[in-house]
Image (cartoon, rainbow, N blue to C red):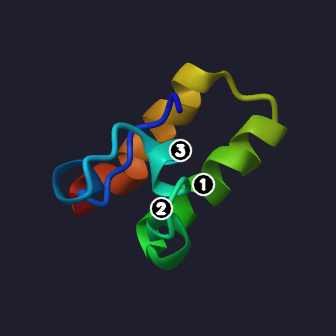
Amino acid sequence: AQMHCYCGCDRTNNHKNLLDCFRDTHGSRCEICVGEAIQADQLAAQGMPIEQIRDALHERFAHKE
């Protein structure tokens, strides 16, 4: 819920965050949502703070919006 989604679903599906993508079927079909979720999980498992995870996701995915 603390992660922005960069696929554009905030405009098309009214999603407010990455968690919203997985509350319906959108997240499981979207390459960007899945990629963000996997990377966020990997970084969290390494002990990275949420602020740095958000920055890393922004760096990797923001240009795809």
Name the mark on residue 19: 3
Question: Which residue does the numbered mark 2 point to in the structure image?
Answer: 33
SS class of the residue under badge 2? helix
- Return the disc, 3 or 2, that comes first in the chain's sequence: 3
Q: Name the residue type under label 3.
A: Leu
Q: Are marks 3 and 2 in contact (CB under 8 Å)?
A: no
Question: Residue 56: x, y in percent?
Answer: 49, 40
SS class of the residue under badge 3? helix
Above or below for 46 versus 8: above
Above or below for 16 versus 6: above
Quarter holding residue 65: bottom left
Q: Which residue is drawn at 46% across and 46% down?
A: 20
Q: Are marks 3 and 1 in contact (CB under 8 Å)?
A: no
Q: Residues within 10 Å of mark 3 (few under 14, many from 20)?
A: some
Quarter holding residue 55: top left
Q: Are marks 2 and 1 in contact (CB under 8 Å)?
A: yes
Q: Name the residue type under label 1.
A: Ala
Query: How far is disc 2 from disc 1 in space, using C-alphas?
Result: 6 Å
Query: How far is disc 3 from disc 2 in space, using C-alphas?
Result: 9 Å
Name the mark on residue 37: 1
Quarter holding residue 39: bottom right
Question: Residue 46: x, y in percent?
Answer: 82, 38
Q: How crowded is mark 1: few (under 14 residues within 10 Å), some or many (20 or more)?
A: many
Q: Which of 1 and 59 is in front in this view?
A: 1
Q: Name the residue type under label 2.
A: Cys
Side of 64 relative to 5 (left or right): left
Above or below for 57 versus 49: below
